[in-house]
Image: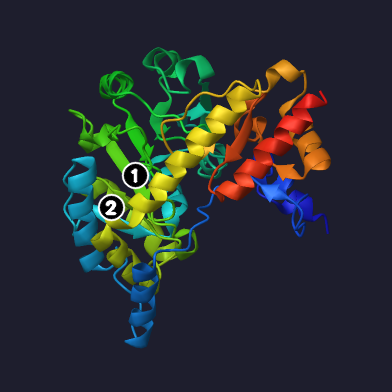
Amino acid sequence: MDIQSKLAGHLNAIPRSGIRDFFELVIGRDDVISLGVGEPDFATPWSIREAAIYSLEKGQTSYTSNLGLLTLREKISEYVQDFFHVSYDAKSEVLITVGVSEALDLALRALLNPGDEVIYHEPCYVSYSPSIIMAHGVAVPVSTTKEDGFSLKPAALAAAITPRTKIVMLNFPTNPTGAVASKEDLEGIAKLCVEHDLIVLSDEIYSELRYDDEEHVSIASLPGMRERTILLHGFSKAFAMTGFRLGYACAPPELIEAMMKIHQYGILCAPITSQAAALEALKGGKSLYDPMKTEYHQRRDFLVEKLNGMGVDCHTPGGAFYVFPDIRKFGLSSKEFAMGLLEAEQVAAVPGDAFGACGEGFLRCCYATGMDDLKKAMAAMERYIGTL
């Protein structure tokens, strides 16, 4: 049997993850310092782990409502009001999902008809374009630049809008660049979305990790945007809860109902143990993630200073836990530079083109790793650059 001929045709447009391909090379190697995987290096705070353990000890091992535990949805509603300054009804406008990834998939499948276009900004998280294609939409990337701080500019968005455009997808702070969008840019984007009657999917998973005393601004909080925005958030990054796989979507009831229809047949509900842990995370809030954020901030400043000091142009990211240095001056492609660094100095970073074509010439370095390893990695990179 020709199995290839039996596969869904639209999968041919989906490449393998550039991150995973690169890290297949370092799996099992204990001698490598990894600046690659976008995952907190901190253990989940003890109070959160304890809540998960206690829920199991109490025998809480059942299904929940398809929407998720009402107590958790109520706490999410309070948290979102306080942090994002947007009000949502816990009973009808909040859906608990298996990570933000599921929430994103649900939103796309609930909204897209074949041929509908989704605009998103690059460099971006590797799953965005494949998620759009798997939902039978058309992925329309808009390039951002280092000179603009990798923010999506309203003029660039306006140039990409067509009669087929249905959704604009945003991610600020951004993986892989750490970029943030100014309120002015968000207001310009919001104006275009209202004018063209577009839906916004706003992935704000890194929103707590904003530095330099800058307050995070959600596009959902701007005039006219709550009714057309699906706010996607979760617990993986700020609370170091990646393995709990828990996220949520906040949106008007009609959108949540449409997403829930898909969720109830595909997933049923998110794990109750993870939901119990998430409830404790929100109770602790800022007191739990601030100590980690302080360390990330120090690491960011260290990397930016070191990279620029060795002649590698690196903008200062406003959030998340990535830097995205420009290595074009060395005359190597992103993959060549990353492979050379790995082979010569046993330091792994992700080639920038894994995050879109406009990421070519850059390198993603994740600083969710200990300061001792970051110091070793920077010394190793400086040695490697000295050989070029």
Tell whether 311 sits left or right of 53: right
Q: Where is residue 261 in the image (x, y as percent from the top left)?
A: 35, 58
Is residue 61 among the parts visible in the rendering?
no
Q: Residue at x 20, y 54 (%)?
A: 77
Q: In which quarter of the image is residue 350?
A: top right
Question: What residue is drawn where x is 76% and y is 49%?
Answer: 5
Q: Which of 183 and 222 is in front in this view?
A: 183
Q: Can you identify the residue that label 2 sits on?
A: 286
Q: Is residue 6 found left or right of 209 in the rendered image?
A: right
Q: Residue at label 1?
A: 208
Inspect the image, locate mark 2, and give the three-letter code of the amino acid beneath it: Lys
Q: Of the residues under marks 2 and 1, which one precedes in the sequence?
A: 1
Point out the frontmost of discs 2 and 1: 2
Quarter holding the C terminus is: top right
Color theme of the render: rainbow
Q: Which amino acid does label 1 sit on?
A: Glu
Q: Which of 241 and 153 is in front in this view?
A: 241
